[in-house]
């Protein structure tokens, strides 16, 4: 199998109404806005979508809504992972994957498996799935880092494992994966702030949080890099720097939802235990007469 997930992937948020119910109308509007602004694929029901706080019926309805709205225009990557290997395998086998183009699966969290345990976990998932698998390494959330050696071992042994969302923050590890990976396997950035250097190192795109709100600008940076126009891409990257810090200072997706609310696109509502973030304060060189988010957006959109 070949990886089809390239460019700007949106780690889609789940909009909620003030009463806490899923806002499907806003979800449709958000997906259309992102499609019109350069999104290359979607990632649904993962961390940014507050999936642990959703009921099964809501997950099913969100999936159906996104599939219908996208209508085949770009690929859809659906999260399916956990720290119980047998349960993940069972979910893969029992789910109707019609309309879905691949599965994103995270390294097991909390139980901190060894590198051999990680290999065996993803071996079982790869053997159970008829869809392409994208690995997800995010040690800041799982408590365990999958090494470059283990990643490449999995990629070599299972041709339906086509990519990794790398969010270790370790650029040396990214370089090792890119250097030794098989030809069918590719790297995606899992960190907005590191997308620029990771694409320079050989990554083929990003699964982005900030792309929810600013897909056109982030997509342009990526496409410039793909075209070898690194100076122009670097200028966009530097314009995003303050916003990167702002959006993640109080966790994900609190900052992104606050920004989308500031843009008038969704309500600023999260489900516990995450809480809404309203104190959007940029740390430096602020014009006190201009709202923080507005000033940051002005930098990106106008300059």
Image (spheres, rainbow, N blue to C red):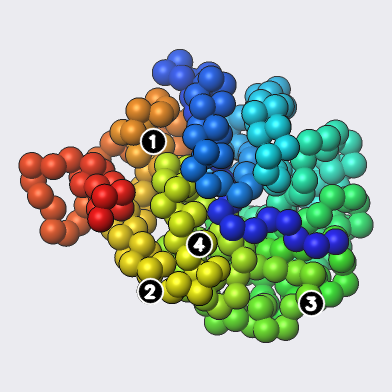
Give the Cα separation between the discs numbered 3 and 2.
30 Å
Residue 277, quarter of picture: top left
**Mark 3 vs mark 4: which is more N-terminal?**
3
Circle 3 residue: 182
Q: Quadrant of the C terminus?
A: bottom left
Circle 2 residue: 231
Q: Is residue 14 visible?
A: no
User: CB atoms at circles 3 and 2 under 8 Å apart?
Assistant: no
Q: Name the secondary structure under disc 2.
A: helix
**Mark 4 vs mark 1: which is more N-terminal?**
4
Q: Residues within 10 Å of mark 2 (few under 14, many from 20)?
A: few
**Mark 1 vs mark 2: which is more N-terminal?**
2
Q: Nearer the viewer, residue 297 or 84?
A: 297
**Mark 4 vs mark 2: which is more N-terminal?**
4
User: CB atoms at circles 4 and 2 under 8 Å apart?
Assistant: no
Give the Cα separation between the discs numbered 3 and 1.
39 Å
Give the Cα separation between the discs numbered 1 and 2.
29 Å
Up/down of 52 relative to 147, above or below: above
Closer to us: mark 1 or mark 2? 2
The residue at the far top in this view is 19
User: CB atoms at circles 4 and 1 under 8 Å apart?
Assistant: no
Residue at 43% over, 74% down: 230
Numbered tag placed on residue 260 in the rendering: 1
In percent of width and height, residue 252 lies at: 45, 46
Q: Quadrant of the N terminus?
A: bottom right
In percent of width and height, residue 54 lies at: 61, 30
Residue at 64% over, 39% down: 45
Give the Cα separation between the discs numbered 4 and 2.
12 Å
Numbered tag placed on residue 279 in the rendering: none
Closer to us: mark 4 or mark 1? 4
Q: Name the secondary structure under disc 4.
A: helix
């Amino acid at each position: 199998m070949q990886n089809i997930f390239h460019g700007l992937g949106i780690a889609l948020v789940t909009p909620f109404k003030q009463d806490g119910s899923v806002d499907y109308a806003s979800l449709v509007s958000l997906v259309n806005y992102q499609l019109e602004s350069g999104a290359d694929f979607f990632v649904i029901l993962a961390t940014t979508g507050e999936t642990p706080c959703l009921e099964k019926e809501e997950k099913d309805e969100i999936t159906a809504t996104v599939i219908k709205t996208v209508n085949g225009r770009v690929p859809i990557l659906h999260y399916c992972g956990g720290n119980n290997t047998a349960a993940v395998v069972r979910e893969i086998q029992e789910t109707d994957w019609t309309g879905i183009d691949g599965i994103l699966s995270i390294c097991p969290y909390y139980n901190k498996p060894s590198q051999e345990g990680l290999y065996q976990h993803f071996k079982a998932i790869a053997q159970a799935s008829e869809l392409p698998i994208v690995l997800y390494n995010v040690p800041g959330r799982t408590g365990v880092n999958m090494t470059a050696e283990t990643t490449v071992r999995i990629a070599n042994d299972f041709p339906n494992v086509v990519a990794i969302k790398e969010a270790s923050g370790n650029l040396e590890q990214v370089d090792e994966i890119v250097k030794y990976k098989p030809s069918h396997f590719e790297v995606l950035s899992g960190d907005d702030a590191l997308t620029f250097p990771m694409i320079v190192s050989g990554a083929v795109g990003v699964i982005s949080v900030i792309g929810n709100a600013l897909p056109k600008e982030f997509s342009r940076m990526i496409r410039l890099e793909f075209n070898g126009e690194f100076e122009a891409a670097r200028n966009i990257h530097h314009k995003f720097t303050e916003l990167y810090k702002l959006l993640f200072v109080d966790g994900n997706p609190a900052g992104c939802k606050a920004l989308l609310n500031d843009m008038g696109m969704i309500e600023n509502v999260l489900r516990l235990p995450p809480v809404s973030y309203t104190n959007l304060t940029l740390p430096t060189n602020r014009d006190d007469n201009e709202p923080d988010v507005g000033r940051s957006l002005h930098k990106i959109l106008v300059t």
